[in-house]
Image: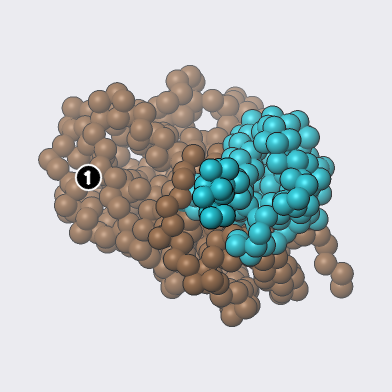
Chain colours: A brown, B cyan
Amino acid sequence: MALKLPIFMDAQSTTPADPRVVEAMLPYFTEKFGHPASRNHPFGWEAEASVDRAREQIAALIGARDAKEIIFTSGGTEAINLAIKGVVEMYREKGNHIVTTVIEQRAGLDVCRRLERQGIEVTRVPVQPDGLVSVEEIRKAITDKTILISVMFANNEIGTIQDIAAIGKLAKEKGIIFHTDATQAVGKIPVNVESMGIDLLSCTGHLIYGPKGIGALYVRRKGPRVRIAPLIDGGGHERGMRSGTLPVPLIVGFGRAAEICAESMTEEGARLARLRDRLQDAILSNVEEAFLNGHPERRLPHNLNISFAYVEGESVLMGLNKETALSSGSACTSSTLEPSYVIAALGASTELAHSSIRFSLHRFNTEEEVDCVAQRTIEVIRRLRDMSPLYELAKEGVDIKSIQWKAE
Amino acid sequence: MAYSEKVVDHYNNPRNVGSFAKDTPGVGTGLVGAPECGDVMKLQIRVNLETGFIEDAKFKTFGCGSAIASSSLATEWLKGKSVEEAGKIKNTDIVNELKLPPVKIHCSVLAEDAIKAALADYREKHAKPAPTEAGAASH
C-alpha cells in the first residue's frame, strides 16, 4: 500500500480525533443540544446525564474515586492555571511558596513566573541528566511556607516519567497539596490519583484522540479535601470552580476518548513502544553522534527525542516537512529562536539543545511509516552534515569548543 | 512558519556548498556565528590575483533553512564581483531577495558578516607589501 504523505509523527503536540470519538460527539451538536444546567426539561436532563457519563469515563481513566472530582476546563493550559493560581489564592494565609521543576511545560512555567511578580516564592528544582527530578531535591526545597508542589507527570519533549508516587507520598507526609500536569501521560500510561497521592491533576482531550478545546482538572474531595479559587466567575458551574456553559459535544468526545484509552492502553502502549524502538534503532545505528535525550527506560512509549550533533533542528525539520511532521523542541517554543530549555536543563551543550528532534507516535502510525521516517531522517542528517562547517571541523580533528566563537 | 519559495529553493538546491583549502593563493575565509547561538557560517572567496575579481565562492552553514539560504545566495552574488563591489552587499539586499520574516533577519546579518570576514581575511593575506619594503627586499 502506498504511504499517505505527509506522515504525522508529532503526537505530543496533538493527536487526530479517533473516528469513534467523532461519532459519539455528532448528535450533541444537533438533536441533543441541551444545556446541562437546564434543570426543568428533558433537553437539560439528557445533556447533564451525558456530561456525567463523560466525568465517570475520565475519572475511571485516572483512578478517581468520585466523578464529581473532575472539573471541565477549556484544555490543559486552563487546568494548569486553575490548579496553581487556585491553590495560591485559596491557601494564601497558609503560605506563599511553590516547589516546581525547571522542565515544566510552558503553562506551568509562565503561571509561576506571573505569581512571582505578585510576591509568591517559587523554587524550581533542577533535573538530572536523564530528565528525572530527584525526590530528595524536592524534599530539600520544601519550607514551612510551601503550599503547593507542582511536578509534571511525563515531559512533553523527552517523555521522561517522574516518580509521581514518591512525590505524592512526600507531599502527604508534609501536608502539602500536590499538583501534576499529566497532559502527556493520561491515556498513555497508568495514572492513578489514589495510589499515587495526587491532589490535583491536569489533562486534556486533544492528546488522547479527543477534540481540542476541552480539558479537565481533577480536584481531590477526600483525604484531604482540596479547595481552589476559581479563575472564571459566573453561574457557579463545576462546583463553583469553573463557571461557563459546558461544551457538551466536546465533553462527550473527551469522555469517549478516555474510555477508548482505558480499554486499549496496555496493548497500544506496547505496540507504540515497539514502533518507537524500531525507529530509534534504525536512526541510532545509522547516524553517528546522535544522542538519545531523556531517560532510556522511564519514558513514554510513544516518545523519541534525539539530538543530532553538527546540524540545527529547524533545518532538519525543513528537510523532512514534505513527508513528515515532527517537531524540534516543542510546538510552544518553535516560534522563537531559543533552543529547547528542556534539553538545556539536562546539562547538554547549548549546541545540542539546538539540534534536538522529537518523534512522537500515535495510535494510527504504521511500521511502514516508521521505516520511511527513519530513512528520510538519516538522509537529511547526512545531507546537512555535508553542509555543516562544524561537522567539517570535527572531521578535521578540531575541538569545536576550543574555537573562540564571535557570538552575535 | 511557511518559508518563501526562494528560501526553499536555496535549501533544496544550495549553490556552491564546499570548501577551498585555506592557504590557496587568492582564498579568503570567513567563519562567523557560534554553535550555542544555533548559527555558524563559513564563507570563502577565491579571488583572481591579477584581475581582483572573485572567481569562485563556497559556503558551509550550520543553522536553520534561512541561514543556509542566506549564505547560499551570498556565494551566488559574490561570484564575478570585484573585491570592492563585494564589500557593498548588504544584509537588507538578502532580506529583500529571500523575503525573510523579521525573526530571520539575523540570518542575513550573519551572511553579511561572513562576507566581510572573508574579504578581511583575503585582504590580510594578500596585502600588497609597502613599496619601501619591496625596495629594501630587492637589495
The answer to whether residue A211 is above or below residue A285 is: above
> Among all residues in the image, which is located at the extreme left?
A144
Graded by Cα atoms within 10 Å as few (under 14), some (14 to 19) or many (20 or more), the crowding at tag 1 reads many
Q: Nearer the viewer, residue A263 or B128?
A: B128
For the question of whether residue B65 can be seen, the reply is: no
Residue B115, image x, y percentages? 64, 43
Residue A32, image x, y percentages? 72, 36
**SS class of the residue under badge 1?**
loop
Horizontal relation, residue A62 to residue B66: left or right:
left
Residue at image location 43% in from the left, 73% down from the top: A297
The answer to whether residue A378 is above or below residue A58 is: below
> Among all residues in the image, which is located at the extreme top?
A234
Residue A226 quadrant: top left
Horizontal relation, residue A228 to residue A218: left or right:
left
Q: Nearer the viewer, residue A387 or B117?
A: B117
Residue at image location 73% in from the left, 35% down from the top: B85
User: Three-letter amino acid code at disc 1?
Assistant: Ile
Residue at image location 74% in from the left, 70% down from the top: A372
Q: Nearer the viewer, residue A372 or A95?
A: A372
Residue A288, image x, y percentages? 56, 75
Which residue matches tag 1? A176
Residue B130 quadrant: top right
